[in-house]
Amino acid sequence: MIFSRFDHECMSAALKLANKGLFTTDPNPRVGCVIADGRRIIGQGWHEFAGGPHAEIAALRDTDDSPGGKTAYVTLEPCAHHGRTPPCTEALLEAGIERAVIAMRDPNPRVNGGGVERLQAAGVEVETGLMAQEAESLNAGFVMRMRNGRPWMRIKSAISLDGRTALPGGDSKWISSEDSRRDVQRWRARSSAILTGIGTVLADDPLMNVRLDAPVIQPLRVIADSRWRTPPESRIVADARTSLVAGDRSVKVRANLEESGVECLPLPASGGRIELSMLLKKLAEREINEVQVEAGSQLCGALLKERLVDEILIYQAPVLLGEGGPGPFALGSLESMADRTHLEVLETIKLGDDLRIRLQPKFRH
């Protein structure tokens, strides 16, 4: 399809609106909508939180002119079913929208083409695919959960110039700069869950919540702990409403851990480690879209070896920590260069003195 310059401007505006819900729409996708008359934008809106008005409704309410005969630009296919709110297709039809430009189809099986078909059946001109890549990138976790039944997995790690994540004794505060640590908070804020391992909990007693001066939904904090060793008094368990411990179902859960009020999730395990693919499946069933992994080399390495990593954030500081400290991934010894893991660099940004490198694994089939 051939889209005009104005079409691109309107969809770009809709994507910027969708981004306003980056920290608040979970578990719903981030969606923006613009209503235009072919010359100017007359209404705009975005989905702010689950259960609240969808982007199309917000945009229709914002119109300063009758939307009849106008064009709706939406970053995700309008729903045609009753969920937490009524179907948006019906609202667009009642408003008299004549044309709908949709960035991408909704991968949710309850929608997936149904919205487009409903609009077309009612005589609305529907065009799809404008800035689809940008729209999908904004909702990578939602798309992954709908298409593959697991969350989008992002590993975050701070390393020195010589590739260490800590000193030999375990001290790691602070490798990265204050600018980098602020940036991490924003990535946490867009995540549905933070995943760590029992080693990190025992060594650092981290809190792993979001500390931003902005409206956020605090992510679920998940601990991979096959032997149920998580201390009930640890800070990550202090607020049991947002914490989950996943352990070996063949090992009895410690009574004091259950009594702490934290949710315990027994899972299959082998070799002393829970089945990570099963953990991710269970998280997806809880409508977890994005998971940020902030863990030691063993858990990060295991996820990478099992090809369960979609994105890696490396914060590299211009410091040298010397020999003996751990690296970010425990992958074991490689017998051949052909066995190395290939990564694609997606983006590099300077944060204070640090360099943030965003990468994507290129797994060979």
Image (spheres, rainbow, N blue to C red):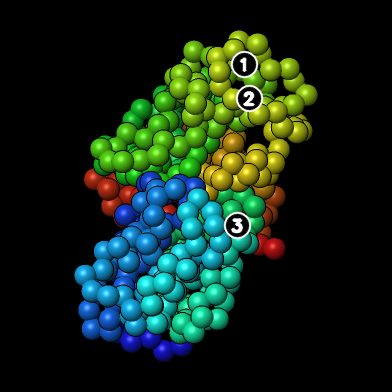
Q: CA distance from mark 3 to mark 1?
A: 32 Å
For residue 268, which numbered disc appears in the image?
Answer: none
For residue 146, which numbered disc appears in the image?
Answer: 3
Amino acid type for the residue under numbered disc 3: Met
State the residue at coordinates (33%, 30%).
174
Amino acid type for the residue under numbered disc 2: Cys
**Which element carries disc 1, helix, strand or loop?**
helix
State the residue at coordinates (46%, 64%).
88
Q: Name the spot of residue 321 as percent of width and height, x first.
A: 39, 33
Q: Residues within 10 Å of mark 1 (few under 14, many from 20)?
A: some
**Which element carries disc 3, helix, strand or loop?**
helix
Instruction: Give the farthest residue toward the bottom.
Output: 2
Q: Quadrant of residue 264?
A: top right
In the depicted structure, whether residue 212 falls above or below residue 312:
above
For residue 258, which numbered disc appears in the image?
Answer: 1
Q: Which residue is mark 2?
A: 264
Q: Residues within 10 Å of mark 3 (few under 14, many from 20)?
A: some
- Identify the mark nearer the N-term, 1 or 2: 1
Q: CA distance from mark 2 to mark 3?
A: 25 Å
| Residue 159 can be seen in this image | no
